[in-house]
Image (cartoon, rainbow, N blue to C red):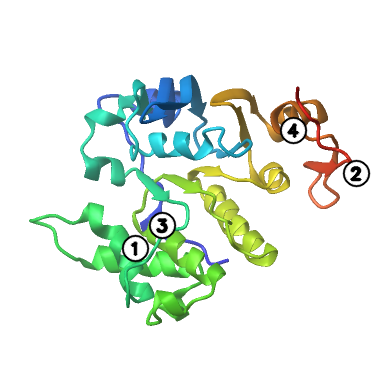
Amino acid sequence: MTSVTSSTSVPTHTDGAGPAAAFAEPPLRAEGLTLAYDKTVVVEDLTVSVPRESFTVIIGPNGCGKSTLLRALARTMAPRSGRVLLDGEPITALRTKQVAKRIALLPQSPIAPEAITVGDLVARGRYPHQGLLRQWSPADEVAVRDALDATEVAGLRERLVSELSGGQRQRVWLAMALAQQTDLLLLDEPTTFLDIAHQLEVMDLCAHLHEQGRTLVAVLHDINQAARYATHLIAMKDGAVVAEGAPHDVITAERMADVFGLACRVVPDPETGTPMVVPARRGGHIRHA
């Protein structure tokens, strides 16, 4: 994997505080968050923090509020009550471009404009850095080039996004997010609709980005991939956080039964030593009364 050059180094934000204060608090924190769609409350009074420079993965059954929480952390969904803090500041107090310079979001199943090339799509990641007095610059070109190199899609720059395979397309979307040059990257089910080989390619790339010092927050359905790649897990059920911490603390047979209704064994992954969930052979689904 090609490394991102120093021009894409992780920025530090010390708005109104010294460096020690900036790094003493989590980069993202939700406090007393209640999230709803019309009258349907999905998340209620939730408080959770994302550790700095972690690869945090949110897991849980369908409909538990994982993606809803991610959208609120990215300020694409307004909470009914509570607040989200970005480096200690209420995220709603920041201008849109301020947030976009600090958080990049890869949504679930993004759709590219028609007839757009890979290079043009990735260049859109530089929008937060543009303005009336600052148009496209050599620094923007370097950021796009580095993002294409880091995701190994530089050779596709002139190709139409619509012509690419699912795995290639997802890497291009990641390149656009990288072009924003943020130190926070949020990903909503980044491996959806990909075959297993492409899933692992995307997850390996995410791990590489984390190793460079970025903070990643991802929603994943695959528990074993979450356990293999995450440094910090958040398990959700019915709109609440039921456990968080290191994978070996969160992934237990008892918790899988409680959260997913799944009878299983948890054994060490033979490749990584991380927890691996092995479902019971037959009749392993636990039916709750």
Query: Which badge, 1 or 4, comes first in the chain's sequence?
Result: 1
Q: Secondary structure at mark 2?
A: loop
Q: Secondary structure at mark 4?
A: loop
3D distance between C-alphas at marks 1 and 2: 51 Å
Q: Which residue is mark 4?
A: 251
Q: Secondary structure at mark 1?
A: helix
3D distance between C-alphas at marks 3 and 2: 43 Å
Inspect the image, locate mark 2, and give the three-letter code of the amino acid beneath it: Arg
Asked if the residues shown at circle 1 and circle 4 are in contact, with their CB atoms under 8 angstroms apart, the answer is: no
3D distance between C-alphas at marks 3 and 4: 30 Å
Query: Which badge, 3 or 2, comes first in the chain's sequence?
Result: 3
Query: Which badge, 4 or 2, comes first in the chain's sequence?
Result: 4
Relative to 195, say whether 33 is above or below. Answer: above
Other-residue count near label 4 (Cα within 10 Å), few / some / many at <14 / 14–19 / ≥20? many
The quadrant where residue 198 appears: bottom right
3D distance between C-alphas at marks 4 and 2: 21 Å
Residue shown at 79% from the left, 30% from the top: 287
Q: Which disc, if any, is residue 282?
A: 2
Residue shown at 66% from the left, 60% from the top: 200
Query: Which badge, 3 or 4, comes first in the chain's sequence?
Result: 3
Inspect the image, locate mark 4, and give the three-letter code of the amino acid beneath it: Ile
Marks 1 and 2: which is nearer the front? 2
Asked if the residues shown at circle 3 and circle 2 are in contact, with their CB atoms under 8 angstroms apart, the answer is: no
Residue shown at 33% from the left, 40% from the top: 76
Q: Which residue is mark 3?
A: 178
Inspect the image, locate mark 3, and give the three-letter code of the amino acid beneath it: Leu
Relative to 6, say whether 23 is above or below. Answer: above
The quadrant where residue 80 appears: top left
Marks 3 and 2: which is nearer the front? 2
Inspect the image, locate mark 1, and give the three-letter code of the amino acid beneath it: Ala
Residue 258, x across and y down, in percent: 74, 26
Q: Which disc, if any, is residue 143?
A: 1
